[in-house]
Image (cartoon, rainbow, N blue to C red):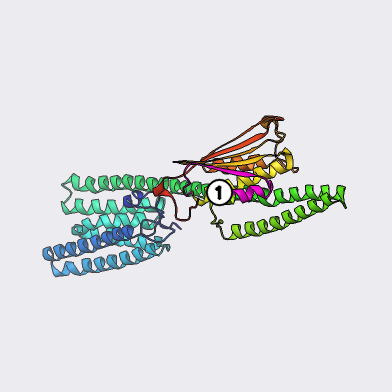
Amino acid sequence: MPTRASVRTPADAAQAGSAPATGPFTTGTPARPHLATIDVAVHLGFAVLLVASLVRYVMRHSPADNLLVLGLAAAACLLYAVVAVLARRERPGAPWMFVLVAVWAVLVIAAPSFAWCSFALFFLSRSALAGPAAYAAAGVTATATAAGLFRMTNGTDVAMLLGPLAVGVMLTLIYDRIQRDAEEQRRLHAEVTRAQGQLAASERRAGTIAERERVSREIHDTVTQGLASSLLLLEAAGRAWPSATARADLGEATALLRGNLSETRSLVHELASPGLDTSPLPDALLVAARRYAPDARLLVTGEPHPVPAEIRHTLLRVVQSAAANIKLHASATVATVTLGFLPESVTLDVYDDGAGFDPEAAAPPSAAGGYGLRAMRQRVEQLGGVFSVESAPGEGTIVAAQLPVPGPGARTTGSTA
């Protein structure tokens, strides 16, 4: 059995991207205020036209004629209310609609004064029915109206016959166009919603990957570097045991492991509750460097000024990773950290006079290591900075970074130098 059409009004088409709504012109979701207003306007229009037509008919006809017309008008009004309620509740109303159309056809032929109410009846039939049934109901309404008006002129005015039929055809074409536009709007809205969902999922995946890379850098620059240095010291102690040198290496390895344990606890705390040490930046950098290169020196150039917490964190990790590389690979006698403050940036150079290497021939990251330089570069470039490595076999190494610092007005309260 045909049911109400899934149609929206022009006002609905103007609201592209909004959620669908229900009412006599829609289906499937809660009604929106502007559609409810259109429904009320159509129903009130029917009531006003019905009363006006009734008054006009009563004033022009005898009481004997009024009884039949009044009964038909009352029946049509009751049936209209039933169909409107069923359409509002999205329940099948085809039988009631066809009874209404039949009653209305008799009424408008018997009393053409009620022809104006056909407009409201046309929209009700199109919203309550779908497919051929809707066209049939609208066609019967237009034909009955044309017959009533033609009868009113005693068959002399062809315009009264053709006018309602032409208006019915035009309203049908307009309504069909509105329906197609509404369907297209819903299709586009569904595509946009689907695309937004895919974008959100992609952003979540990208966020997860970025967070995994960040955690891997943190673990590399803290836990991995400390454990690697401690392992070297323990291996050296094992080869020289029980000499005094072995005892010194063992003591240093123990100190490194204790520091590494503390660093791991700090990392866990940082992941759970982000925050950084508030000590002055030069002091923090020197402590980070001397953890792996005890004789490291610090030089500061320029006028120190506060830097944002994320820049401070990056500088600390770069120094820590570079100093660990010096201990593991460089066999250096001199290690110097230079911190430079410029008006709109901060620079960092970590120099050692060790064995050096060819940056172009550096091994790619693997299970055996090789993450240090990549992690340092990622940290710096993610903050809009520039990272570089200058080295050659036998000529030492310089790890350099330059990070932009916001102007004084943009610096955060938690920044520190």
Residue at point 48% right, 46% down?
Answer: 304
The front one of 325 and 247 is 247
Highlighted range, magenta: 285-306
Q: Quadrant of residue 61?
A: bottom left
The front one of 149 and 334 is 334
Give percent across and percent down for residue 150. Answer: 20, 50
The front one of 163 and 185 is 185
The front one of 245 and 130 is 245
Q: Which residue in the protein does label 1 denote?
A: 282
User: Does residue 326 appear to the left or right of 68 in the view shown?
Assistant: right
Give percent across and percent down for residue 357. Answer: 70, 32
Residue at point 37% right, 63% down?
Answer: 88
Give percent across and percent down for residue 143. Answer: 28, 51
Furthest residue to the left?
59
Q: Quadrant of residue 378?
A: top right
Q: Is residue 214 above or below residue 358?
A: below
Q: Is residue 207 visible?
A: no
Q: Secondary structure at mark 1?
A: helix
Q: Is residue 135 visible?
A: yes
Q: Is 410 inside the magenta-drawn segment? A: no
Give percent across and percent down for residue 124. Answer: 32, 58
User: Does residue 157 appear to the left or right of 416 in the view shown?
Assistant: left
Furthest residue to the front?
244
Residue type at mark 1: give it. Pro
Q: Is 290 inside the magenta-drawn segment? A: yes
Q: Quadrant of residue 380?
A: top right
Residue at point 48% right, 55% down?
Answer: 414
Q: Residues within 10 Å of mark 1 (few under 14, many from 20)?
A: some
